[in-house]
Amino acid sequence: MPRGLLAETRDADLEAFTNRRQGITADQSCRDGSSSAGRSLRRRPPVRPITQVHLAALTERVRRRVIRWFRLTDLLDASAALRPARRSRPAAVEHSIPSLQVTNDDIIKELLARSARHLDVPSSALLARTLEALFKRSRTLVRYRHVAPEKAIDFGVDGGRQAIATAGMVPEDIDLLIYVGVSRGFLEPATANVFQHELGFTKATCFDVLDACAGNE
């Protein structure tokens, strides 16, 4: 290819690239009859200066929107004041515990009595001191254990009935029952269904939430 033709091709490619960057097509260039040297690019329309009339109209528009916003806020506040406040709060909290009370001293005495034929007097005294120190660290003084014919579910049912009575409600007023525990007595159905049946919550939705020990760090 001759050097002159190569230079003209490069100039044409550069001109086409410049036109694309500036938003001017080749058809427009030909139609306008302008060359690459004398072409005048399209300019944006001039920005109108803001006059006092424009500023007054803008200020009035903003003022109306502010007034409309405050009126809407007042209406919302008035409607909120007319609506009764709905606040959830515990109506009653009750509990039920087994009948057998066991203290730390009772446990130590039982262990010493069962170990008397295996330990001498100094060893028994050491065992007693060790158990007392461990119980003191556990911060537990009294334990309650159920005896026959008591069952674990009986205490939950008894506590539920006490709570309903304290709240002045009837079983039909309850619409939600949640059983929360480390373990449950049944895989299917949910333990909450058992309490629902025992307590007579015929209108309640119920489900289980199983928890676990948080440990002692």
Image (cartoon, rainbow, N blue to C red):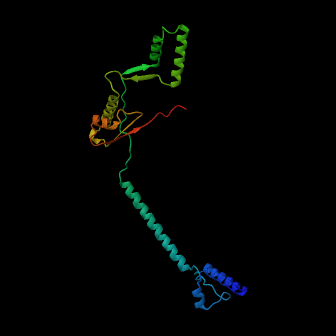
**Residue 28 at x, y percent in the picture:** 58, 87
Name the side, left or right, on which 157 lies relative to 129.
left
Residue farthest to the right?
A: 3
Residue found 44% across the figure and 22% down from its top: 142
| Front-lying residue, 72 or 10 | 10
Name the side, left or right, on which 86 lies relative to 5.
left
Residue found 32% across the figure and 21% down from its top: 148
Rendering quarter of residue 3? bottom right
| Front-lying residue, 63 or 114 | 114
| Front-lying residue, 130 or 175 | 130
Residue found 54% across the figure and 76% down from its top: 55
Residue found 53% across the figure and 21% down from its top: 134
**Residue 155 at x, y percent in the picture:** 34, 29
Specify the quadrant that holds the N terminus.
bottom right
Q: In the figure, 85 relative to 198: above or below?
A: below
Q: In the figure, 22 relative to 160: above or below?
A: below
Name the side, left or right, on which 60 lies relative to 33.
left
Q: In the figure, 76 relative to 177: above or below?
A: below
**Residue 203 at x, y percent in the picture:** 28, 43
Specify the quadrant that holds the C terminus.
top right
Q: In the figure, 201 relative to 105: above or below?
A: below
**Residue 213 at x, y percent in the picture:** 47, 33
| Residue 170 seen | no
| Residue 5 seen | yes
Rendering quarter of residue 45? bottom right
| Front-lying residue, 144 or 74 | 144
